[in-house]
Image: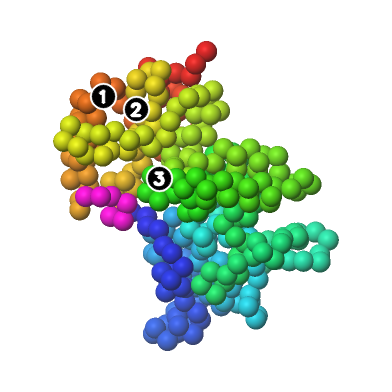
Amino acid sequence: MRRRIDIPQARALVLSRHQVLASGYSERQMRSDLDSGRLLRLHRGSYVSAQIWDELWWEGRHLLRVLAVHAASPGPGPVFTHTSAAALWGLPLYRVGAAPVQVLVDGRRHSRVIADVIRRDMKVDPADIVEIDGIRVTSPTRTAMDVARTYPFPTAVACADAALRRAAVDGFVVDAQADATWREDAARLATPGLRGVRQARRALEFADGRADLPGESVSRAHLHTLGFRGFDLQVPVTGSEGQQYWLDFAFPRARCFGEFDGAAKYTEPALRAAPSAQQTVLDEKYREDDVRGVTGWRFARWGHDHLRTADVLGARLAAFGVRPPG
């Protein structure tokens, strides 16, 4: 089962050459493990065990590489941007896959790749460069904008939703003023002339901080592409005994609730409310039965496999009688 990590956890996993040798390795054993793939080189002078690497989602793997590049850099280190900034902020990178670490440079004519690090020549307002745990990085909003202008709509929406959520949402409650401020800031950053700025504006304007998981964000993006309008997100329902439930999606025309069921909801302790996966399943069944009873609405459920494309999700919803208007 893969797991997520933050910066302090990632720092504990990145090993210097000295740490590897101090743990009992000889030079020969270290070379042997590197050749066999049991030990992985993250960047110059930094390593991680293959076993730990295999346990991590891509965002965590990229975070390790970012920390390795930072450790090998002189002075305060570079300013990390794009997907590398997103990994530092803990923003999702849906289906991005392996990619080089990305940093800012100023004064070069062209961006270029050196030692698996993309050095991007961009002008960034100093106010949009901040520090997190001693590492310089573009702000969450600037990061979301850069990801949005360089990656497809579903990836961009997942990242933008998460950035907006951290700025303006507490639980499922939106702070309207903070939401408006974030959108003003995003619009300021999406200036004409930047490559991909038009697609970035589309994703940033579509962003909704109520999306609780990347799968919900990608679902929203696909629903929009399919022509769905008028559906709602994170809809409150009061149960038969006064419980407060939140439903991922509501389709009023079809009188149907929609739920994205990612595996992490059941398998990752940090993401499930119950102490075990079995109890989570039982609680979810009780919740669905209760909501059906008090509303008379049906349920449609889908998972990661149904998010491969918009058409796959559309076919899944059609099987439940949920179709776009028209």
- Quadrant location of the N terminus in the rendered image: bottom left
Front residue of 318 and 186? 186
The magenta stretch spans residue 307:
no
The magenta stretch spans residue 272:
yes
Q: Mark 3 — residue?
A: 173
Q: CA distance from mark 3 to mark 1?
A: 22 Å
Q: Residue at x 29, y 22 (%)?
A: 297
Asked which secondary structure carries label 1, the reply is helix
Could you say which quadrant of the image residue 213 lies in?
A: top left
Q: Mark 1 — residue?
A: 295
Name the amino acid, label 1: Thr
Front residue of 297 and 275? 297
Q: Earlier in the sequence, mark 3 or mark 2?
A: 3
Residue 162 in percent (x, y) is at 49, 49
Q: Mark 2 — residue?
A: 257
Specify few, some or many for label 3: CA neighbours under 10 Å numbering under 14, 14-19, or 20 or more.
few
Specify few, some or many for label 1: CA neighbours under 10 Å numbering under 14, 14-19, or 20 or more.
some
Residue 268 in percent (x, y) is at 31, 52
Left of 14 or right of it: where is 236? Answer: left
